[in-house]
Image: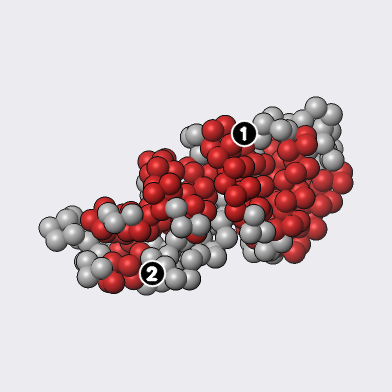
Amino acid sequence: MEARKITLVLASTFAAAALAACTSDVGTVSSQSDPAATPVPVEQTESSPSPVMEVESAGSTSNGPATLAEGIALRDAGKLEEAEATLVRASEGDPRSSRILVNLARVRLSRNDAAGALEASDKALGLTPNSASALHQKGRALAGLNRGAEAIEVLTTAREMAPENGYIANTLGWLMLTRGDAAGAVPHLEAARDQLPEVAYVRNNLGVAYERSGRTEDAISEYRAAVAAGDSGGKALKSLERLHAEPVEVGEDQGPADGGVDPTVVAGK
């Protein structure tokens, strides 16, 4: 009897954690960029600290949270093939769950399967048409299929529905950058910067937009912020070197003397 009580408690705790995890929203953007451009926008890989909550569609039985949580854990561990298979099973068990489908789209995008991600995000939108998360994944999938104009339209709608989501703003700004519209990208990337000031690739992407718009000093400031935040593949540091600018402005506080991390060391990882 005591063992059964422990089992029930653990199962309840795991299910609660799964339901919390399944609403998180990630906006990974394609790493393809304009090969002719010198400054490089960076891939987005981190999950949102303030996810857009999705209202579960009517009729969902929500009988697969453990499987969904397992799929998310496998994705986070880099086991993308297993994660996809797990989420497909979760969707089969709960075909009315748009959350599962959004996460499935995200995994397929990580596997460079834009067509499969588009299918999953469209199914999610069929269940929850007002889901900014599903629109975000659909926009990313369309971008991956080189359907840029459609992607911008979808992502613009997602931005209007969730203006507080910096990851959607970054994705839209990044896509505009890759299509040569730096001026159009600036306000979206500024919004992403305001909402996600410590995310290195957001600061780098805004720096790229500023530089391509002729705002060199503003670009240097953003590149420095990207380096201080950890940089993404050292791209911001390389941009600073190309612009003959120091990673940290002369006279600027570089952090505590007792073990503060030098930003150039972080960028070199």
Q: Residue 33 appears at what percent x and percent y? A: 50, 65
Q: Determine whether 58 is above or below 176 in the image.
A: above
x, y (%) of residue 214?
Answer: 29, 56
Numbered circles on residues, count = 2
**Which circle, 1 or 2, is nearer the viewer?**
2
Name the quadrant containing residue 82.
bottom right
Q: Quadrant of residue 40?
A: bottom left
Looking at the rendered structure, the kind of residue marked 2 is Thr
Residue 77 visible in this rendered orientation of the protein:
yes
Is 39 positioned to the left or the right of 152 in the image? Answer: left
Q: Earlier in the sequence, mark 1 or mark 2?
A: 2
Name, please, the residue furthest toward the left.
251
In the picture, the disc for residue 102 is none
Query: In this figure, which colouring scheme has been used for the structure?
Result: secondary structure
Q: Nearer the viewer, residue 146 or 132?
A: 146
**Three-letter code for the amino acid on which mark 1 is drawn:** Met
Residue 239, placed above or below residue 186: below
As measured in the structure, the alpha-carbon distance from the residue carrying label 1 to the one carrying label 2 is 37 Å
Q: Position of residue 57 (x, y in %)?
A: 77, 30
**What residue is at 57 percent from the left and 46 percent from the top?**
152
Determine which of the numbered discs, if any, sits on residue 38 in the image. Answer: 2
Query: What element does badge 2 sit on?
Result: loop
Does residue 237 lie above or below 251 as drawn? below
Residue that mark 1 sits on: 53
The answer to whether residue 192 shows anywhere in this view is no
| Quarter occupied by the N terminus | top right
Q: In what quadrant of the picture does the C terminus appear?
A: bottom left
